[in-house]
Amino acid sequence: MKVTRCLITAFFLAVSVRGADEVIALKAARIFDGKSNAPVQNGVVIVQGDKIVDAGSNLPIPSSARVIDLGDGTLCPGFMDAHTHLTSDFSGDYNQHRLKEVDLNVSEQAIIATSHALATVEAGFTTVRDLGSRFVGSHEFVDVALRNSINKGVIIGPRMLVATKGIGSTGGHFDPTSGFRDFLFGREADYTDGIADGPDEIRKAVRFEVKNGADVIKAAVSGGVLSLADEVDTPQLTPAEMAALVDESHRLRKRVAVHCHGDDAAREAIEAGVDSIEHGSFMKPETLTLMKKKGTFLTPTLMATEWIMGKLENYPPALQAKAKAAAAARSDMFRNAVKMGVRISFGTDAAVYPHGQNAKEFKLMVDLGMKPIDALKSATANDAELLGIAQKVGMLEKGKLADVIAVPGDPTADITATERISFVMKEGKVIRQGPPAVQKIKNTASPNFAAPAD
Ligand SMILES: [Zn+2]
């Protein structure tokens, strides 16, 4: 009996050691390493276990290696999206979404979220910064559960850095009870929902979110498009509240991302020392100059306004007006930011549009004046730096985790090639080679299933 158990243990040990030792050589016509100014020919990435052993042009391939030849494609580091909401999907009819949010059990919404995670990683996004997950009337931390389940290998999805609830003021963009009848949920939202007023409460909310698993702190410092009780560009935190937010987060070694459309709020947030401005629609050139001086990242989320503008009839009139104003301002703002050399991170606000279409952001960036190579760097080296994980991912080089994707053709010649990923590897494991599995889920889904559509 003991001997049998020993033999079984030895067998599994041998299998796992062999698995860890297997050398995989990825080959393609080109390679973009995540930081250089152009792809180079004859790309090779050698992977062993979860790490990159070597990467470059015309490298010798070890005879023991399993070769995966990706043909006339370009090997790239796994893309990153610095602004997602994997636990939600509000890409359809806005009012229906509000009803569904209070109608569906949070556990069911969490299960649906697993399909969003799969769609995202299969689209080539091996890392996301997930900036806010809340369910009105519920204290569940679904984003933390999703992140942990992915890390444990229970489900397949991107590496997630999560923000939990996000922090905002009473009645502001993040107040989950805004727009509903007063006291429908029996009490005002408080720090346990991320809603805080005054510097001390803000500190408490930061501590509460870190206690419950936040990797990054998100706050709403100005109004937003998809909220019913605010104007899109008004400041929603005071400079004293922003100072407390940044100080408390940085003391706990957490970066701060702020949702912000308005120019005044952006200037105050940048002065307070936030790490990134999300959206930034109405930012004036002087504010962009301040950003550049301070090294603050801009996460433009062009996909969000693009999607809403294409489906305006899905939103109530008040939100349509806010979306139009933000869309009218954001293109000039983005062009100015590119011209001025503001640091730009890649982030899309996935959930506003159906999950898995993240790469469409690349073309929007290029159409507004960004060089294709710079757009690619925004989703690789830049995002890795903003997320504070550049030692581990974001580049194809020796010692980094083996997050490798393949894009057909040359994405610097046709940036939309990023929308047609042919291969995804995360930490040395092949997640996709051929058609995405998420399609199969979509086809068998019930009509109520909130899987990516359109
Ligand atoms: Zn967002």
Image: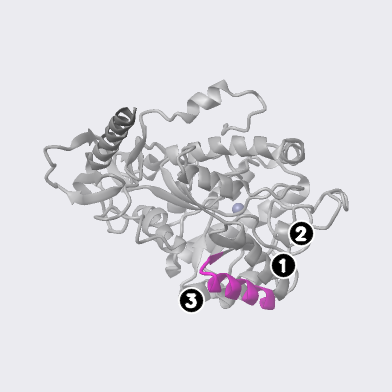
Question: Mark 1 or 3 closer to N-term?
Answer: 1
SS assignment for the magenta stretch, majority = helix
Choose top left, top right, bottom left or bottom right for residue 442.
top right
Question: How dense is the environment of label 1, judged by Cα within 10 Å: few (below 14), some, or many (20 and up)?
Answer: many
Q: Which residue was labeled with disc 3? A: 294
Tell me the kind of residue under disc 3. Answer: Lys
Q: Which mark is residue 402?
A: none
Quadrant in the picture for the C terminus = top right
- Relative image position of residue 360 (x, y in whole percent): 47, 44
Tell me the kind of residue under disc 1. Answer: Gln
Question: How far is disc 2 from disc 1 in space, using C-alphas?
Answer: 9 Å
| 34 with respect to 196 (left or right) | left
Question: How far is disc 3 from disc 2 in space, using C-alphas?
Answer: 29 Å
Q: Are dots 2 and 1 in contact, CB under 8 Å?
A: yes
| 173 with respect to 427 (left or right) | right
- Relative image position of residue 379 (x, y in whole percent): 41, 53
Q: Residue at x 68, y 57 (%)?
A: 224
Q: Which residue is drawn at 65% across and 42% down?
A: 90
In this orientation, which residue lies closer to the viewer: 296 or 369?
A: 296
Q: Which residue was labeled with disc 1? A: 236
Which range of residues does the magenta coloring cover? 239-256
User: Residue 244 magenta-drawn?
Assistant: yes
